[in-house]
Amino acid sequence: MNTTKTSLRNEVRKLAEEAFHLKLISGYGDGQDGDEYQIVCDGKPKHFPLENARLILRNMITSRHERELSWSK
């Protein structure tokens, strides 16, 4: 695995950990394919390419933070 893919996988793992602790997802882990990452939402595991997983997790976390900010106004 090259360093770019390794750093992308590490970033996805950190985002997944944050999403898990925010209770946005119920599980996560490496996919069977080295280019995939598994995200569990609503009890349903789904495999995504690393780039897509990063985008999905970022969007989930950002949306959560935006909702929290709107509630605090």
Image (cartoon, rainbow, N blue to C red):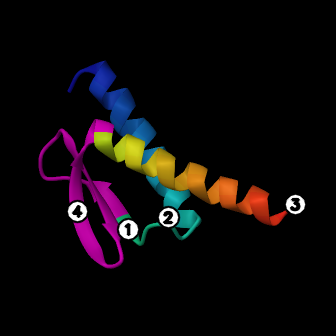
- Position of residue 28 relative to residue 34, above or below, is below
Marks 1 and 4, the one that precedes in the sequence: 1
Question: How far is the residue under mark 1 from the one under mark 4?
Answer: 10 Å
User: Residue pushed farthest bottom?
Assistant: 43
* Front label number (3 vs 1): 3
Question: How far is the residue under mark 1 from the one under mark 2?
Answer: 7 Å
How far across and how far down the image is residue 5, in percent? Answer: 28, 27
On the rendered image, what quadrant is the N terminus found in? top left
Amino acid beneath label 2: Phe
Q: Do the residues labelled 1 and 2 touch (CB within 8 Å)?
A: yes
Q: Mark 3 points at which residue?
A: 73
Q: Nearer the viewer, residue 72 or 19?
A: 72
Answer few, some or many: residues within 10 Å of disc 2's Cα (few below 14, many 20 plus, some between 14 and 19).
some
Marks 3 and 2, the one that precedes in the sequence: 2
* Front label number (1 vs 4): 4
Marks 3 and 1, the one that precedes in the sequence: 1
Q: In the shown orientation, is residue 54 left or right of residue 68?
A: left
